[in-house]
Amino acid sequence: MFRSPRRARRVAALTAGLAAAALTLAACTPAAEAPVEEPAEGELTGLVTEGKLTIATGEPAYFPYVIDDAPESGEGFEAAIAYAVAEELGFAAEDVVWVRTSFEAAIQPGPKDFDFNLQQYTITDERAANVDFSSPYYSTPQAVVTVEGSPAAEAGSLADLEGLLVGAATGTTSFTAIEEQIAPSAGAQAFNTNDDAVLALQNGTVDAIVVDLPTAFFLTGVILDGGVLLGQLPADAGISDEWGLVLAKDSPLTAAVTAAVDALRDSGRLAEIADEWLGADAGAPILQ
């Protein structure tokens, strides 16, 4: 069929225009969005590393909470607690990853590089403003420790301690217990860490220190030459010393971790772990 050159050019131009329009329409058409996968019921969300449970402890971590500073072994009170919680959450031991943090850094506001952290963190309202806590995995009274030859060595009551120098790590329940239960005339002596407080006791800078009861047993039985455990502070003074697992503020894991701790408590497993690594607290008199 004959076509004039002019008609042929018009057809070619129209075809090119239709093709360009088709490309433009294709470019303007939004791509189909990939379906958003909802987590399955019971599936954990918000993990630091998907498929792993990242747990933090101190640097170093101390006996009896972690044996030989090796939490990976599961040996020690808090190492055992960590693996028990991991199992409740559905993680095998090989899927647990350990990281280290300082005590203070972990309870400051901001993102965390761990899913939960345990370093004998007492649950307080002040800390709960910055981080989440699980339900308590352990409750402990405070205890007073001294050494033979110290002016505190013969103290048998809270009144006997009032005129002495009594110290503890600052920011701890132990420090608050000194201020509120002993109220020494010289004020509570503050130290950066328990290690600093122990050193001060050893060199005579303070007459006695206050620590939680498991630590008191450890200090008097292992660390201090001539260590003396004077007794426990009364537990009914309104000072809570319940330890909880620390999570990032508003963590999506908090409810699941709390449920795991609750299940371990209800089954008696928490008590078994405490008995195994901390022993009974019998034998420490209550100071009045």
Image (tube, grey):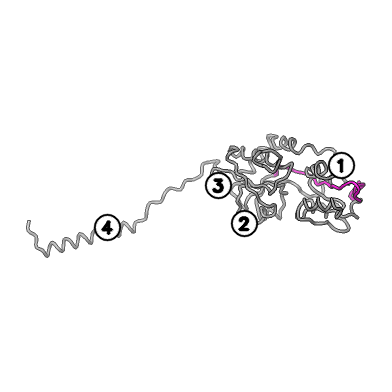
- The residue type indicated by label 1 comes to Pro
Instruction: Classify mark 4: residues with Cα within 10 Å, few (<14), some (14-19) or many (20+).
Output: few
Label 4: element kind: helix
- Which is closer to the viewer, label 1 or label 4? 1
Residue that carries the numbered disc 3 in the rendered image:
49
Q: Earlier in the sequence, mark 4 or mark 3?
A: 4
Residue that carries the numbered disc 2 in the rendered image:
110
Calculate the distance from the C-alpha at mark 4 to the C-alpha at mark 3: 45 Å
Q: Earlier in the sequence, mark 1 or mark 4?
A: 4
Residue that carries the numbered disc 1 in the rendered image:
285
Calculate the distance from the C-alpha at mark 4 to the C-alpha at mark 2: 50 Å
Residue that carries the numbered disc 4 in the rendered image:
22
Instruction: Classify mark 1: residues with Cα within 10 Å, few (<14), some (14-19) or many (20+).
Output: some
Pick the residue in front: 134 or 77: 77
Question: Dots 3 and 2: beta carbons under 8 Å?
Answer: no
Calculate the distance from the C-alpha at mark 3 to the C-alpha at mark 1: 46 Å
Instruction: Classify mark 2: residues with Cα within 10 Å, few (<14), some (14-19) or many (20+).
Output: few
Q: Which mark is residue 138?
A: none
Query: In the rendered picture of this protein, how many numbered marks are placed on residues?
Result: 4
Seen at 80% across and 56% down, the residue is 190
- The residue type indicated by label 2 comes to Gly
In the drawing, does residue 41 fall left or right of residue 211? left
Q: Earlier in the sequence, mark 3 or mark 1?
A: 3
Q: Residue 238: x, y in percent?
A: 79, 49
- Which is closer to the viewer, label 4 or label 3? 3
